[in-house]
Every structure is written in C-alpha cells, then in structure tokens.
Image (cartoon, grey):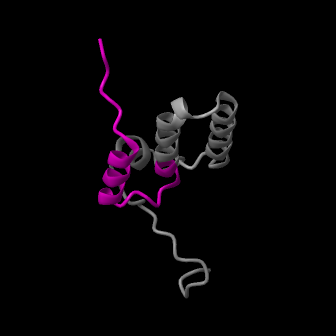
Amino acid sequence: MPGIPTPSSEELARYLEQRGELGKPWMLQLLRLTKLKEAKDSMDPDAYMASLQEAHADLMRLGEFWKGREQEVFSGRYQPPELIEPLPGSPEDR
C-alpha cells in the first residue's frame, strides 16, 4: 500500500513560507533533508553520506528544542504558556 507522496522541496518551501515557519530550525532541517533526498541520485555516494551525516549532526545540535513546545512542534497547534516571562533586561525582569 503506497503512502502519501512526499512534497517536493519547492512545494515544502512554499508551504512553510505561507505558514510563516521558515524561521523554525526543525522546519529548515526538514527542508534540508528533502532537498538532499532529491539530489541523492545525482550525488557521489560518499558526498551524499557526508551531507547526510552533517545534516544529522546539525539536527542533534538542536537538542531537545521541543521540550515545553510539544503541541506546537508535533501537532502544529500553538498554545501560549500560562506563565509569560518578561524579556531579559526589561523593567519587569528581576
């Protein structure tokens, strides 16, 4: 049973831009991996593996970016936190 087709990198970039999500690091990684997947057949296997390992390392450097943001990251539903922290250096910052 075939799955849902993956959008092209161009379609994905357009979608992310329309939703205002191009500034989210995990979305940029998704776009990067999509572009890499599209280029795989035209790349030297060693260059492909090196690029894939580099992308993986960058993704791991994001750390647990999703902690406390599970609704936004995994379901696309943003819910503001109940406690709103003041901006560092603002008069409200203690």
x 36%, y 48%: residue: 10
x and y percent of residue 47 in the render? Answer: 67, 36
Q: Is residue 43 above or below residue 77?
A: above
Q: Is residue 11 magenta?
A: yes
Decide whether residue 47 is among the magenta residues: no
- 41 or 77: nearer the viewer: 41
Q: Position of residue 60 (x, y in %)?
A: 65, 42
| Quadrant location of the N terminus in the rendered image | top left
The magenta-colored residue range is 1-28
Q: How many marks?
A: 0
Residue 71: % across, % down: 39, 46
Q: Horizontal and vertical percent for residue 91?
A: 55, 88
Q: Give the camera-side residue of 23 and 80.
A: 23
Considering the image in quadrants, where does the C terminus appear? bottom right
The residue at 31%/57% (across/down) is 19
- Residue beneath the point at 30% across and 16% down: 2
Q: Quadrant of residue 57?
A: top right
Please give the name of the residue rendered at 61% of the width and 44% of the height, measured from the top-left corner.
59
Q: Is residue 58 above or below residue 6?
A: below
